[in-house]
Amino acid sequence: MRRQTWQLRFEPQATAPTGEPPTFEVKSGPGTVVLLEGDGSGLPTEASYVTRVTMLDATALLEEGTMTLDGGTLRLSTIGTGIMEPAPVEGLLRGAVIWRVEGAGRFSGATGILASVFSTDPAKGTAVENQVAQLFLP
């Protein structure tokens, strides 16, 4: 197996929370992918994702979904729980989640862990998310 470490950046958008417990969908547009370490062969040139977030309480969350990358996908599932809490800037929220990654399509057999750190301004509908993924690829 070979190993790659990626840095990804997105500016996702979310739907309004509904239900009990509150759930919402997060979608990213095209994000950037930068190789931080490893053999660069097969590095995707574009990435996007769709996830479903379930708030467990005021700050704890579960998030699952799929990232799409150049003819393949990565299934994302929360390890433990993520967090989302007020940031020290008025109206801004910050958070983090760690996902287990399982590949399909051209990424079939890939496994890894992806860490995401984000901030969002719900009133403006804007967000910035930075991720680091360490993948083991067949």
Image (cartoon, rainbow, N blue to C red):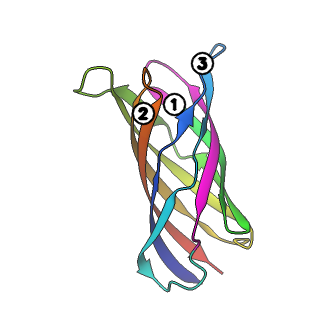
Identify which amino acid the numbered label 2 is placed on: Ile
Q: Which residue is mark 2?
A: 83
Please say if the residues under marks 1 and 2 sit with CB atoms less than 8 Å apart: yes
Please give the range of residues in magenta.
44-61
Task: Kindly identify which numbered label has been placed on residue 102.
Answer: none
Look at the picture and state if 47 lies above or below 90.
Answer: below
Image position, residue 94 (x, y; %): 35, 33
Distance from label 1 to label 2 (Cα)?
Answer: 6 Å
State the quadrant of the C terminus.
Answer: bottom right
- Lower position in the chain sequence, tag 2 or tag 3: 3
The disc label shown at residue 61, or none: 1
Quadrant occupied by the N terminus: bottom right
Q: Position of residue 84 (x, y in %)?
A: 41, 30
Q: Secondary structure at mark 1?
A: strand
Amino acid type, mark 3: Pro
Q: Earlier in the sequence, mark 3 or mark 1?
A: 3
Q: Earlier in the sequence, mark 1 or mark 2?
A: 1
The secondary structure type at the circle numbered 3 is loop
Q: Does residue 1 lie above or below 55 as drawn?
A: below
Mark 2 → mark 3, Cα distance in angstroms = 14 Å
